[in-house]
Image: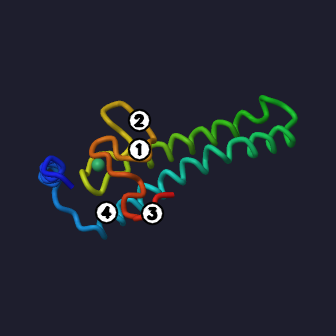
Amino acid sequence: MDHHEVEVAAAAAEAVQPVDPAEIARGLAVVRKRRWCLWTVLIVYLPTMYVTQKITHSFNGSMPVFFIWFAVLLGVMFYSATARCPRCRNYYHMHGMMLLYLRKCLHCQLPISGDKSDKY
Ligand SMILES: [Zn+2]
């Protein structure tokens, strides 16, 4: 680490409150769990609609199932969007009106697997 890097690291450490690694790990686990909920609901869509079409044999008949799924999707989107970054305390996936599911915090760039030494 050269002199410049040390300065940058010091500035970054000043900008955010000191949080202990256990707290970061706990916070990231919550963020990961909520992301996982969202992906699950998204993936469940295809088999659910497939089965619904098989049972009802009509588009109109499967509409209620679609709306239920959509309501659940909105719920988990809200649930995942309000997950807070354990380091900077901002919304991990939301910056203003922008909702982005990156693998890092939109505010302080804390990686989603930042509490683990080996990245997957
Ligand atoms: Zn952050």
Give the vertical position of 99 relative to 27 (above or below).
above
Q: Which residue is mark 1?
A: 81
| Marks 1 & 2, CB-CB < 8 Å contact | yes
Alpha carbons under labels 4 and 2: distance apart:
22 Å
Give the vertical position of 60 relative to 71 (above or below).
above
- Which of discs 4 and 2 lies nearer the camera? The answer is 4
Q: Residues within 10 Å of mark 4 (few under 14, many from 20)?
A: some
Residue 99 is labelled as: 2
Sequence-earlier tag: 1 or 4: 4
SS of the residue under disc 2: strand
Sequence-earlier tag: 3 or 4: 4
Label 4 is placed on what type of residue? Ile
Alpha carbons under labels 1 and 2: distance apart:
7 Å
**Residue toward you, 93 or 114:** 114
SS of the residue under disc 4: helix
- Which of discs 3 and 1 lies nearer the camera? The answer is 3
Tell me the quarter of the image containing the N terminus: bottom left
Q: Which residue is mark 4?
A: 24
Label 3 is placed on what type of residue? Asp
Sequence-earlier tag: 2 or 3: 2
| Marks 2 & 3, CB-CB < 8 Å contact | no
Residue 118 is labelled as: 3
Q: Is mark 3 within 8 Å of ligand 1?
A: no
| Residue pictured at 79% horizontal, 34% vertical | 61
